[in-house]
Amino acid sequence: MLCIAVIGVSFSAILIRSTTAPSNIIAMYRMMITFLLFLPASLTKGRKEIKEICGKQLLLCCFSGIFLALHFITWMTSLKYTTVASSTILVGLQPIFTAVIGYFLYKEKLSKKGFLGMLLTISGSSMIGFFSFHAGEGHFYGNILALLGGLFGALYIIIGRGIRKKISTLIYGFIVYGTCTVLLVIINLMLKLPFVGYTHKDYILFLAMAVLCTIGGHTIFNWSLKYIEANKVSITMLGEPVGATILAVLFLKEIPSFWQVLSGILILIGLYIFMGIGEDKTVSLTTYNEG
């Protein structure tokens, strides 16, 4: 399931670069469409669960949605200033933040092999980030935004790790995506960005992002947070820059540099080591029933 999620989110950068709309508008429509797709099932199948949610749980879900909105704004804007590979790899540094915060909040630890795999993946990401900083002022600004996107993404994952043990994927996504949509609408109103007037292709791409990247990507990650530690989910997300870079070559003719290729190889090796830890069992089969 995590592999499917990685493939889903890998399309994000490609679809974003193919649109003509501003970054904040892209994020708003992506989340709004996702929320609307969640709405029917949430109000029917999940009505009882919604009524039983306590104030603290609702507040945490709202904070998660806020951090998700900030993650999208900073990361999507970074794609306007730097390459797909650099942006996705730098935003993928979020496991550093996730591992540190997860250790203090949930006492989640890594084995020696897990730490080695994480070190390799982060080394690969850091390598491309370092060389990207020398690509000019615009690239530097884009890289900083991507790094902030990684921090906000980590906070989104950390909150999800705690709350998903108590709330189903459906209702968690419903509240988080709804909050994210409301915040993005408010921000776009303040920035006086036009909500309409975009091409038919743009609206199709918004729908594709909602289905492929959010439901087929982020929602699966949210589902997995009930069973897998936050740092493991974050590490798995580092497969996104590799997939995004390959897709950028195929669809955007954006050829990666030597350092980008080398960083991708390190990321794949690190993921192989990290995900191949046989003795590190995180969940039993009996836990896969959400009721």
Image (cartoon, rainbow, N blue to C red):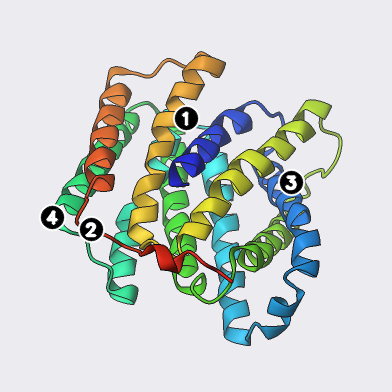
Q: Residue at x 51, y 13 (%)?
A: 253
Q: Identify the element where label 1 is drawn.
A: helix
Q: Identify the element where label 3 is drawn.
A: helix
Distance, label 4 to label 1, CA atoms, is: 29 Å
Q: How busy is the neighbourhood of tag 2: few (under 14 within 10 Å), some, or many (20 plus)?
A: few
> Taking 46 as reference, is 59 left or right?
left
Q: Residue at x 39, y 30 (%)?
A: 242
Image coordinates of residue 77 in percent, x first then y, are 57, 41
On screen, residue 47 above or below 55? above
- Amino acid under label 2? Asp
Distance, label 4 to label 3, CA atoms, is: 42 Å
Image coordinates of residue 108 in percent, x first then y, are 28, 68
Residue 172 shows up from this direction: yes
Between circles 4 and 3, the one closer to the viewer is: 4
Q: How busy is the neighbourhood of tag 1: few (under 14 within 10 Å), some, or many (20 plus)?
A: many
Distance, label 2 to label 3, CA atoms, is: 40 Å
Q: Which mark is residue 244?
A: 1
Distance, label 1 to label 3, CA atoms, is: 21 Å
For marks 4 and 3, the one nearer the N-term is: 3
For marks 4 and 1, the one nearer the N-term is: 4
Q: How busy is the neighbourhood of tag 4: few (under 14 within 10 Å), some, or many (20 plus)?
A: few
Residue receiving disc 3: 29
Residue receiving disc 4: 112
Distance, label 1 to label 2, CA atoms, is: 29 Å
Between circles 4 and 2, the one closer to the viewer is: 2
Q: Which mark is residue 280?
A: 2
- Amino acid under label 3? Tyr
Residue 127 shows up from this direction: no
Quarter of the rendering occupied by the C terminus: bottom right
Q: Residue at x 47, y 64 (%)?
A: 288
